[in-house]
Image (cartoon, helix red, strand yellow):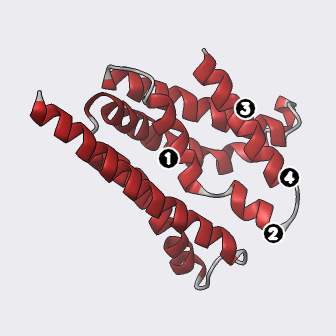
Amino acid sequence: MICLIGSALFGILDASVYELDSGWAFWLANLVSLWLLMPFVFGTGFRKPLVSALLGLATTQVALLAFYLWLANFQISGMPFQWLFMSNYVAAGLVTGPLFGWMGGLWATRRWSAAGLILAAAFLIEPFAWRIYLGRWQPVFLLSVAEVVAGVIMVRFFTMKSRHADTHALAA
């Protein structure tokens, strides 16, 4: 239950940032990598990868619902115009939520480094994906730099932790 409340708060926080109506806020609220980080982190709290995957699905969908309800001022009547737009994100969340939740569970239980490195790759690749999509860098270049730095830190963290776990597994 705490994970679902946390994901709703994530959706509301992201929508609140989006509503700030400034260039940096728009780009921060649209970072895909943060929406992948959320189910990964929540997925680390469970020992069974299937449970982590289901939680990743649930938390992603709850966060999306909270995001769009917040933008519509919690009036369902204001939502229909957003359903078509929102459906793309819901569909993407049906894949990414369980996938990243599952990977979070695998990281937590087995220290499977590939799971963490895939998450880090999202942070490393996203700024370049925006560059390809837009034909230019994001207007808030510092945000792209911060995202790449976060990805590099994650690579270091996940490789160190998985090596540490491998060392202890070999000693046992």
The CA distance from mark 2 to mark 4 is 11 Å
Residue bearing mark 2: 23
Question: Which is closer to the viewer, label 4 or label 1?
Answer: 4
Q: Is residue 87 left or right of residue 78?
A: left
**In the rendered structure, which disc, 4 or 1, sits on the residue that comes first in sequence?**
4
Name the kind of residue labelled 4 in the image: Glu
Q: Would you say the residues marked 2 and 4 are in contact, meaning their CB atoms lie under 8 Å apart?
A: no
Kind of element beneath mark 2? helix
Residue bearing mark 1: 92
Residue at the (53%, 66%) spot, across then down: 149
Residue at the (65%, 46%) spot, across then down: 86
Residue 152 image offset from top left, x and y in percent: 45, 63
**In the rendered structure, which disc, 4 or 3, sits on the residue that comes first in sequence?**
3
Question: Which is closer to the viewer, label 3 or label 1?
Answer: 3
Residue 42 image offset from top left, x and y in percent: 50, 30
Few, some or many C-alpha atoms within 10 Å of disc 1 (few <14, some 14-19, many ≥20)? few
